[in-house]
Every structure is written in structure tokens, then in C-alpha cells.
Image (tube, rainbow, N blue to C red):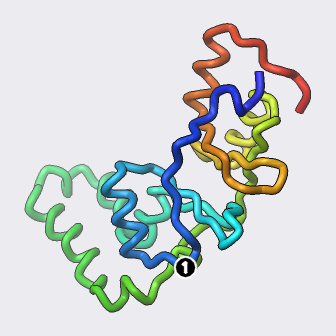
Amino acid sequence: MKVKDVMRTSVVVLPQNATLKDVLDKFLKHHLDSLPILDAALRVVGFITIDDLVDILLPRYYEILRDFSALEDKGQLASLFNQAFQGLDTHHEQLILAVDVMNSNIHWVHSEDSLLAAAAHLQSQNFERLPVVDKDNKLVGLISDFEVILALLRGAPATASL
């Protein structure tokens, strides 16, 4: 079975010159955990994950959550989160572009790749989802570890050609 047989073809994307506000709006409106970034030729040039946004907007998020005492004082926790957003105003949202925050060091998978090859790419990248491209490196979908695992659990034969 190939990636094209199980990938999602409905994908929310943004151009590399989209603003940080555009990125945030897409994540919030569509409840995304990742967002492919495209160039003018519709080729994937980057990927933004929710973790990337957390690192940028709430750099102490994971540290705060590890501190159980901070969790018990909801007022303190809310205050810390509010402070993280105080420095982000409309002017800054327009100056920061998707290309500035995207991860451009990703490997996508091709629609003709086997599910095992996709699983290997997902594991090596440590992502839950990766862009799927055609032979011209244009985006045609997304594949997630969830889709791969479901296909394998259904007993679909996964081609061993990596």
C-alpha cells in the first residue's frame, strides 16, 4: 500500500509570506497541529507545528506545566500565560512572516512511497504528520502516524521497498 492510498488530501496551507497573525488564525480556526508552508509554485518549503508556536509565543510553557505548584494556583498560571502574549501586538504580527517561524529542515514523503517508508520518515523527523508531495514536489496531501498505523492494523500490505 502506498502513501497516496491513505493520505489526507484536504490540507490547510499558507504561503511563505503569510504573517504570524495569518498563521495563528489558521491554527485557531481549523484546530491544526501543523501547517505546511508553500512557495509561489505550490511546493512545500516549510512546516509549522503547534510546538513551534509554543516555543515562540510561550517559551516557558512546558517549564510552567512541569511546576505542579503553579498549576494549583490558577491565577498565577493565567498571569504567566497572559504575560507571554503582552509583547505581541498587531505591528509585530505583521512583521513576522511564516518563513521566519517555519521549520525548513523537513523531509516530506512522496505519494508513491510505501507506508513503511512514510512511517520511517515520520519517526526520523519526530513529527506526527508530514507533507506528501508529487513528483514535482507540489503538495498533494498530509500523512500522519495515525493513518499509517490504522492502515497497518487493518492488515493492509505495506510495501517493503524503502
Residue 112 coordinates in the image, percent (x, y): 81, 35
For the C terminus, the quadrant is top right
Residue 28 coordinates in the image, percent (x, y): 32, 57
Q: Which residue is mark 1?
A: 17
Is 137 located above or below residue 101 in the figure? above
Residue 105 coordinates in the image, percent (x, y): 72, 64
Query: Which of the two residues, 62 or 2, is positioned nearer the viewer here?
Result: 2
Identified by mark 1, the residue type is: Asn
For the N terminus, the quadrant is top right
**Residue under the image location 26 percent in, 76 percent down:** 85
Q: Can you name the residue that lies furthest to the front here?
A: 41
Query: Which of the two residues, 74 or 25, is positioned nearer the viewer here?
Result: 25
In this rendering, position of residue 32 left or right of residue 46: left
Q: Quadrant of residue 74?
A: bottom left
Is 59 located above or below residue 51 in the figure? below
Query: Which of the two residues, 54 or 40, is positioned nearer the viewer here?
Result: 40
**Residue under the image location 75 percent in, 53 percent down:** 107
Residue 121 coordinates in the image, percent (x, y): 74, 42
In this rendering, position of residue 51 left or right of residue 132: left
In this rendering, position of residue 128 left or right of residue 29: right
Q: Can you name the residue that lies furthest to the top here?
A: 155
Q: Quadrant of residue 94?
A: bottom left
Q: What is the secondary structure assignment of the residue under circle 1?
A: loop
